[in-house]
Structures are given as structure tokens and as C-alpha cells.
Amino acid sequence: MLRLVEYQTTTVRLTAPEAAELARMTVGTRGGDGRARIVQRLTSTAEPGWYDLQPGPYVGRFQLLSGQVVEVAGRFPFQDLATLLGLGRGTAHLEESATPGSGGPGLVDLIALAFVREAERVASQGLAKAYQRRAFTRPPYPGAPSATLHLRAHAGRPDRLATSANRLTPDVPLNRLVAAAHRRLSGLPYPDARLGTRVRALDPVFRGITVAPGRPAAIGPVPARYRELERLARLLLDDSGILPTGAGLSGVSVMFDMTRIWETYVGAWLRRRSPGLTVAGQQPIPLTGSGPRRTGVADFVVYEAGRPVAVYDAKYRPWRPAPSTDEIYQLFTYAQRLGVTEAALVYPAAESRRSATTVGPVTITSHAVPISPS
């Protein structure tokens, strides 16, 4: 297994096909294969067969066509990543310690462990069930005769019978969602054989549950005992945060786009600290007043009574007290076009910090925000 850390360069040994496959996943490459460009940089070294490999802001695990498994750990402590990924209460019960990028269980293993524990708990109480109307065209014939079914199945033949009846079944949308996530985890390799055994031990629990391709259907209200398991299942099946499989990738891949996840966290942080105000994400901002139209996109704009009052940019990297020149240009331009004097950069950090840089009438604040369960 190749163990990497997001944005850190590691020298690794690769075969020519593995290097070519990773090269196709590098930022800036073109192609309609639908795969995320998760590799920031891949360069050959002076020694044949050895490469400097730098992943981008993705955390998780995927498998190359050769069978080689690549795991990318996060730069920040696992508990912070767990909170960002929405594991919440489930991670509080994890006994295994995580040392990202240095061996032992990785992020995906711990997500799998959280899922397994929640699934085992729910299964011990019994899967949720609901009544469904079933058709019967062979004896015995429970329920009541159905003229419509009789015509459709037997063309009204008098020597045949068709009935329908309600049957209690666990094959309901909520369990289909969980079963789909379990199937995805079942295809992953685990360094800890015991964890792989526990994942496979859930196979009988979900046997007979329909796993449909594509996005899970709406499931309605979620019972309290299922809430953590449902969140974990959606986390694993969310297309916006998982590297697509197929199209030349073998095995099952689980990759989380930490840049997007951090933006989501910052949005929630802003809404908590801005009661009575409106926080709008991904706001287009016209940059030109004449000539060719140019438009920028701000991560967040805060409005008061419909009037913009501040603009924020989420930065998924270690905090630094002063913005770069490019960031000053960007946020100053956004502030000027919006007619506001407050702009900010928001970074993940172990402790709260803040510093301010004044550019004319605009104050750009750099916030270091600790990651904590909401």
C-alpha cells in the first residue's frame, strides 16, 4: 500500500503502468473519464522507477488497475477530519488510535469501523420494517383476489388466480441506503483483517435488501436509532465527495474532497455566528463595469436585510496571519464590487487566532477556526 498525506510530496516506487494511470489523474490533465484529478504533481526522479508524488486536497483510499492501493491521509488530526466528514458521535466511541500517514489504521478504516459499530447496534435491535403490497400469481394465494393483476398476469384465464396482500419486509428505502454503503465498504481492503471480517459479517444482515444503482432515493423521516448510521451511509455514497469508480479504475474508491467539505463547515460556522443575517454560498460577483464581462465567485457573502455586509473565503490549509498578494487582490476586488468594508479568510486550526490587514477602506481578517462538533 502507498501511504501519502495530502499536499505532502512522497517518493514512491511505481511501475510504468501505475505511473501512467496516476499521471491521468493529475491536475491539469484532460479527458472525459469522469474521474477527479486528485494528484497535484507527479514527477520522475533520477532513479528509474521512482517518482515524487504529491496528492491534492483529497483524503481516503483508491485502488489502481495493478491492484496497488493508495491511501491519502489528512494533514490535520484525525478527530478534526472526523468532525469535518460528519462522523460526529460515532467517532467518540472509536478505540483505535489514528496516526495519519505513518502506518496503522487510516481514515477509511476508521470510517468503516464507525459504520460497522453503528450497523451492528442497529442490527441487534432489528432492522426497520414496513408493509408493502405484494402480488401472488402462484399458490398458495394469500390476501384478496386482484382483478387488475389477474388480467395482467393471466389475461383473465378462469383456471388461474392472482391475489395481493400486505407483507412486512425490511426491504425499505432506509435499509437500501445502508446496504448500498455496506456494499461499498465490502469492496475495500483493510490492513486490519479483523475489521474486514466484521464488515463481511454484516453480509447476512443485508441479504435480501435491494441495492439499486445511482443515488439513494428519498427515505423520509429517519428513526433516532438510525440517524448516525444514515449519516455515515450518505457520507460514503455522496457523489460530491467520493472519487468516481470505473472508467479505468479498479476496485472501490472512497475519496473525500476536503476543500468542499471545509467550505461546508465554514458555512455552518458563519451561520452560527451570524444570527439574524443571511449567509449565501458561491455568490457570483461581477468584476467589470464595461467591456468584456468578467465574473468571480465568492465562497460566502453575508447579507443584512438584503444588503451585503461582508465577504468570506474558505481556505483549507494551515492558518497564516497575513493574506498573500493574490488573496489581497481577490478579496479587495470582491469587497469593492459588493460595496462592503469587511472581508475574511477562514482556516482550520487547533486554536482560535485572528489577525487583520487593512487595504484602503477594506479590512481583511484572517480567522483560525478550531474544528469542533456542532
Image (spheres, grey):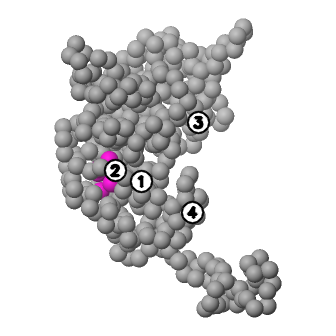
Looking at marks 2 and 4 on the same chain, the residue that comes earlier in the sequence is marked by 2
Q: Name the residue under label 1.
A: 184
Q: Relative to 331, does residue 82 appear above or below in the rendering?
A: below
Amino acid beneath label 1: Arg
Q: Which residue is drawn at 36% across and 56% down?
A: 186
Range drawn in magenta = 108-113
Can residue 174 be seen here? The reply is no
Q: Mark 3 points at which residue?
A: 280
Total tally of numbered discs in the picture: 4
Say if mark 1 contacts mark 2, CB within 8 Å.
yes
Looking at marks 2 and 3 on the same chain, the residue that comes earlier in the sequence is marked by 2
Marks 2 and 3, how far apart in space? 37 Å
How many residues crowd mark 3 within 10 Å: few (<14), some (14–19), many (20+)? some
Q: Residue at x 49, y 47 (%)?
A: 238
Is residue 137 rendered magenta in the image? no
Q: Which quadrant, please, contains the N terminus?
A: top left
Marks 1 and 4, how far apart in space? 19 Å
Position in image of residue 66 (x %, y %) = 33, 37
The numbered disc on residue 219 is 4
Task: Mark 3 vs mark 4: give the one in front.
Answer: 4
Q: SS of the residue at dot 2?
A: loop
